[in-house]
Amino acid sequence: MIEVKDLTKSYGSFVAVKGISFRAESGQILGFLGPNGAGKTTTMRIITGFMPASSGTVVINGLDIFTNSLEARRSIGYLPETPPLYSDMRVVSYLNFVAKLRGVGRSQVESATDHVLKTCGLTEMAHRICGQLSKGYRQRVGLAQALIHDPPVLVLDEPTIGLDPRQIHEIRELIRSLATKRTIVLSTHILPEVSQICDRVVIINDGAIALEEQLSELPTGTSLEEVFLSAIAKEGDLPGAGAEETLEEVGAGRSQA
Amino acid sequence: MRNTLTIAGKELQGYFVQPVAYVVLTVFLLLGGWFFFSLLQHFAEMVQMYQMMGGGQQAEQLNLNTQVIGAVLHNLSIVLVILMPALTMRVFAEEKRTGTYELLLTAPIRTGEIVAGKFIAAAIFTLIMIALAWIFPLILMLFGNPEVGVMFAGYLALTLLALTFVAVGLFTSSVTQNQIIAAISSFGILILLYVISWPQTGGDTIKGILKYLSLPDHFSTMVRGVIDTSDIVFFLSAILLALFLTQRAVESARWR
């Protein structure tokens, strides 16, 4: 379970995240939506303990990420915006390294690596050097390292970016199957992705929550696209400019999906 | 401890797949060999000259340790001022630039373990480098009769000096994501610590402090063969201070 309360992050005078609160329950996939620069990545970095919040709290399965950081970090699997690969390591030794780092027992390191290589479709790439992988495979290795210690909480920053349509389908299926006993938060630009795999959606715009809703409770007959556009238009100071940018993104999302 | 060893192991493997480390190693040994060759040749000429002039006593006063090994070590210490920043500049800066820093800082490990692991790996590489430079004393031992104790003290001095450079290099790398900035600032700090006792003005207290901070003062005492606890304490505390500052710099990412 992830509980975010009144989270604020400011860089000098610029406030990137303005007091947002939401909850993600176990067994649930929460889709984190918003235009570029809305504060999605910042929020995810705070949730995973990479950077501290200026104020507010994040509680992961009952442990505060700031005051009880080490314990809380144990239960998180995190795929950052750019997959954190060491370009001169082979995939298999990289995954072994991450497994040890995340506290997988010595005797289980190899089986954990084998397992994620299989689930992420990387078995044939196991002995390739990370720096020589294509974007799609880098993304899969990034996902594999997030899953390696079988964490109860998964935070995925744009997990399907850079993948081809078949891979997108596979990874979505994988995320769906992982959700049964885990809490998953994922950010994305692709709206159909949210309607396909998420249970709950949080739309943030300009650092504040514009909408938080169970997908099943969205008004019938309206597409997520309409909901998204109206949610971020309400908040924007310049609705015209905001909508234009958003339409571009939606278009891009569609062609990717 | 386990996490420290995990990081140290991964880092150490990293050194052996990286061209920079090999270049540093090669340059270090090539220049060392050149110094050794020319100093030894000069020494042999001097011995011959004194003998031809009939100055047997003066020839006996010539010392293989001070004139060859000591001089080689002094020259190598300057070479290390330039090479060690190149070896350590990427340690943190590269992780920040490529995004793997996020992996390290979100893993359930302490920042102290990260710093210790990275230092141990760099230290082991440095020890290998200096161990290979034992080839020069070994050659002398094969063909002459140098004093082993003095050479040992000298190599210990070079090792402590190099480890101090490593710790300073880790610190400058931890405060930036630009490798060039990391290298140049650690180069600057090391050069400053080399020349810090140059000003001859000021009271005795200031002169004393500057002399205490001066790296070559501690280094040359040991190269002469005098292992003084205060010199060893100086190097060890410099290493610990730099590592402590590194840990603070890494930890500062978590400060509100």
Image (cartoon, coloured by chain):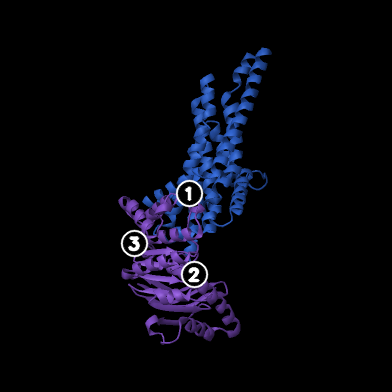
Chain colours: A purple, B blue
Under mark 1, the amino acid is Leu
| Number of on-image labels | 3
Chain bearing mark 1: B
Residue on which the image places disc 1: B240
Q: Could you say where residue B126 lies in the image, as x and y percent from the top left?
A: 50, 40
Residue A67 seen from this side: no
Q: Is residue A179 above or below residue B186?
A: below
Check chain identity for marks 1 and 3: say if they share one.
Answer: no
Q: Residue at x 51, y 56 (%)?
A: B95
**Disc 1 element:** helix
Query: Which of these two is toward me, B6 or A229?
Result: A229
Q: Is residue A170 above or below residue B203?
A: below
Residue on which the image places disc 2: A41
Between the C-alphas of marks 1 and 3, the distance is 37 Å
Chain bearing mark 2: A
* Disc 2 crowd, CA 10 A, few/some/many (<14, 14-19, 20+): some
Circle on res. A150: 3
Query: Which of these two is toward me, A29 or A104?
Result: A29
